[in-house]
Image (cartoon, helix red, strand yellow):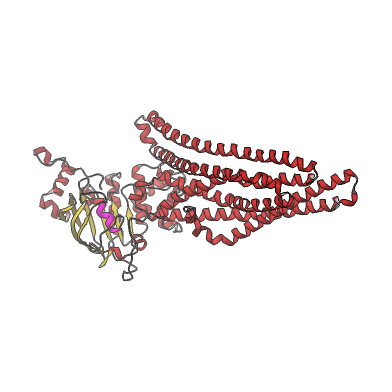
Amino acid sequence: MKSLLKLVPFVRPYFLRILAGCAAFFVARLFEASSFLLVAEGIDAIDILDRGNQAARGYSLKTITVGIIAAVTLRFFFIVFARRAIRRVGISVSFDLRQELYASVQKQGSRFFAGIGVGDLMIRAIQDISLVQRLIAMGLIQLVIMVYAPVIAVTVMLFKSPSLTLLILPALPLVFVYAWYMSKQLAITSRAVQERLSALSSHTQENLSGIRTVQAQAQEDNEIARFWLSNDAYATAFYAQARINSLMGAWMPLFASLGHLGILVYGGNLVLSGQITIGELFVFFYFLNMLLQPIRMAGFFVTLLQRAAVSTDRLYEVYDAVPEIEDRPTDNTPAEISGSFELRNLSYTYPGSDASVLEGISFSVEQGESIGIVGRVGSGKSTLLKQFTRMVDTNPGQLYLDGHDVCDYPLARLRAQIGQVLQDPFLFGEALRNNISYDDPDRHLDLIWDSAESAALRDTIEELPQQMDTVVGERGVTLSGGQKQRTTLARGLIRDAPVLILDDCFSSVDTETEEHILSRLKAMRKQKTTILVSHRVSTLRHSDRIIVLEEGRIAEMGSHEELLRLNGIYAELERVQTQGISSSEDGGSGEYELSGSR
């Protein structure tokens, strides 16, 4: 119950609807009980008629028949209303839970996704929330039965025959103890089933995402064997849960049968001795079923309860996760940024690491300036870019945007005005026009074509059968690497943001196409700031200034010509790329490895 109480904020808005549904179901059960009492009256009336004693009849058969029809009809309307009301609440709560889960995930960073995989999140969003929905839609109705049935049943049975009632009541606590013990076992197996299912889903999602790598390495058989282990672990956990459910499902009817046997033997003698009528014996059988109904349902109800409790805990692992980047804006930041940056002795160390990725970085970027960044693998290029949009937790007092600490800006406003084209081009499985105009699907088509032209993508799109309406498949699988990079570049350019960050987004583009893109880029962004990471000198030379990073520090900084005259790291890189000469040929540091960065 401690876990399920976490659902109160989600259930509270629908409290009146729940109350109305439970009340309607309660009334429906009263009409159901009334119909069986009338049936008992009818049995006694027929028995009296059979004996020829018409004067002793309580109600006529016609009156009893009309009463039964009325009770059954009214029960029908109340039960329909109750089930609709409760099930709508279940759907509404699951909708709210899923929305909250999705909103929570959007705020998380890399550490969160390192601990909870995409497949696991999918199971939480679908399976776990469905289990909570089932508890509300079905469990609330069962809860009404479990409260209502014993009260009504025991009251009627005691009124009809106290001695027959007392015969069966002592066994009920034993049944309750058994159900309570089995519920504890069920809780353990329920969590195991959910965790194994999440692991199975994560394994499947990861494998299918990398299916080309699996096939290229001829690892199909090994992956099938690995999947067998995950599948077997889930099946084993599910079997353990099914075994407990089966035991409860087998024992509960046995307890009910023993009660029926007691009523048949002892109640039959009471009928023969004239202490109760045949109709009253019939009532006992019905109300014993009503009394035992909650016990028979206990296994299913406890299963719902425990699985929903486990699912709630798993959902709140996401809801309670603290975002890595704390959004703590102040009121003194401008609504529109111009794009000037100042870095003051900026340093950064990834959580859990002892070594600094960036150390003592200091430089400024003026509005409209173009900055190029280059460095060896692991020199901190991508980490530096993440500081500008706080994709990592930037330290206060080290990075300023337009004279204000970047930590003072609302994250949404900061990232909305800084366009980013990431190193790994990601496309959604939608039409090209939707991918390019992702941030504003209602943009005019001419603007989308202009952006595609700037990214040297027009000719490619015109060759496609449906042009802008061509669906590119999951993660852009139908496009080549260069086409995907140019599509994501078009997505960045169309925003015309005050600041544009390009993280090595020309690595799969040929030099001729690159020159076309860079010339358009320079013309478009004369008054706007551009920050570019690349390992190509042909790309970097277009920048106003170039920063060379070495082991997290600034090793060199200046224009293309200034760095060549310096004859340092950048000059060596230029010689390697233009002449194929490296200092390694005369005992130097070796060829500059630049693709990919941390």
In the image shown, does 83 or 162 lie closer to the viewer? 162
| Occupied quadrant, residue 321 | bottom left
Q: Residue at x 54, y 50 (%)?
A: 133
Q: Determine if residue 17 is in view.
A: yes
Number of marks in picture: 0
Q: Residue furthest left?
A: 586
Does residue 483 appear to the left or right of 290 in the view shown?
left
Taken as a whole, is the magenta stretch helix, strand or loop?
helix
In the image shown, does 405 or 213 lie closer to the viewer? 405
Q: Position of residue 255 (x, y in %)?
A: 62, 39
Q: Position of residue 572 (x, y in %)?
A: 14, 46
What is the span of residues highlighted in magenta in the rendered image? 383-391
Above-or-below relation of 63 to 227: below
Q: Is 558 inside the magenta-drawn segment?
A: no
| Occupied quadrant, residue 177 | top right
Q: Determine if residue 437 is in view.
A: no
In the image shown, does 205 or 320 lie closer to the viewer? 320
Does residue 429 appear to the left or right of 483 in the view shown?
right
Q: Position of residue 430 (x, y in %)?
A: 45, 48
Q: Position of residue 187 (x, y in %)?
A: 48, 44
